[in-house]
Amino acid sequence: MLISLFSGQCVQASGGIRAQKVVVHAPVPAASRSGVRALIKQQHVTHITATPLLRKTVAAARRNFTGSRALLERTRHSVVQIALPKHSATLGSGFVLKEHGKLWVAMPFHLGGDAGTVRLVRFRKLDGSIAEQEVTIALNGTAGWHAPDVSLAQLPEQWYGEVKPLEIAEVDFNKNVYSVGYIAGELEVGEVLPVASRFTHVDGQSMLREFHIPGSTMENPVSGNGYCGTPLFQKINGEWKVVGMHNGHMMDLKNPAASIGSSVNLAGTIPQLIDNYFHPIAMGRGLEFRGWEVTRLSEFERVDSISVFSDGSTEASAVRYLRNFAAPYEDAHVEQVLGDLNLQRGDRLVFTIKGRSATQKRAQREVEFIIP
């Protein structure tokens, strides 16, 4: 968590990209550190709302929720708690979805981590009982403003008849959006926090929206740590669909109602990640510029930066970083990034290409393209 200035006001950043939350490493023994204190020590979280106040706030928010009560019921067997193995405290939220005939648990990459990481999923079965299941991250995106901050783990087949998977849909920026998920702490399954809001901005994979936790005041602010991974819902064609996933927020301590939440735009993220997982050959794509194919990007690569050399110069006249731009490469986006540079015939562009994961980022290559 950090304190920063945003629009001239003091804000508290929490979770995800805005706060640069550190991916959790291997858990310490439960005997020596457990529950909320373990969460604080392992995630560098300096404040978690006290459990009595948290429970009171969450309960009041559910009672006074202005959205559909049917939505709360719809999420009862699909929104899950994410925790560290052998720890009871909630690390964040996630949800169950169905793709390619498999059930998946989606969570933020900054909570789930790279493929091979183990997390504990806690959920309510259809019969009302609570179940826990360790899952292993199978595939992941990356963290960054334009990156798919998503990790996905398969849910074992023994639970297929015990949950209700959610469906992903394209976002409608003109409609209200509702989030339903957990806050970090010792909360029971079902003690979800619903928040109603509206989108304000969209930029590639990222969306910003109004974000006010009901009951949070300047005197008793509710930090909202752990809300990352909460699915965002809209009613599409009469059904509640998931359009985004919360991955961070900035709390305005002077005016909690003016706080801002960020989320990942899921329609172009999760289906693509899962398609690429099952069809890796199809994951590679051409990197084109002005209709010319510069090179082929593998499923593990992204464009990190572009250097522009003009008039035969040996020194880059400009370098524009794409900041983890993880969506499929688009010429139009690069034109925008390069701004008002007047590119001419003979100018040389050098694309620096890196891998996506922490390990893959150590490897990079450069590809040169001379404008014909």
Image: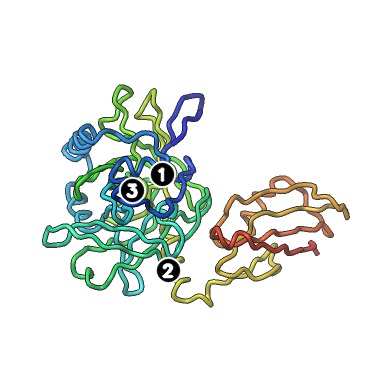
Left or right: 9 as drawn, with respect to 304: left
Foreground tag (3 vs 2): 3
Along the line of sight, the residue nearer the viewer: 50 or 123:
50
Query: Which structural element holds mark 2?
Result: helix
Secondary element at image label 1:
helix
Q: Which mark is residue 43?
A: 1
**Cβ atoms under marks 3 and 1 closer than 8 Å:** yes
Q: Position of residue 257 (x, y in %)?
A: 35, 29
Whichever of callouts 2 and 1 sits on the residue coming sooner in the sequence is 1
The residue lying toward the viewer, choosing from 246 and 137, is: 137
Image point (79%, 61%), residue name: 371
- Residue 310 visible from this viewpoint: yes
Q: Of label 3 and label 1, which has the lower sequence position?
A: 1
How far apart in space, not on screen, are marks 3 and 1 (Cα)?
9 Å
Q: Residues within 10 Å of mark 1 (few under 14, many from 20)?
A: some
Residue 274 circle label = 2
- Tell me the quarter of the image containing the N terminus: top left
Location of mark 3 (residue): 91
> Could you say where residue 286 lies in the image, as x and y percent from the top left?
63, 70
Dot 3, how many residues are within 10 Å of its Cα: few (below 14), some (14-19), or many (20+)?
many
Give the CA distance from mark 3 to mark 2. 24 Å
Horizontal side of 148 relative to 293 (left or right) equals left
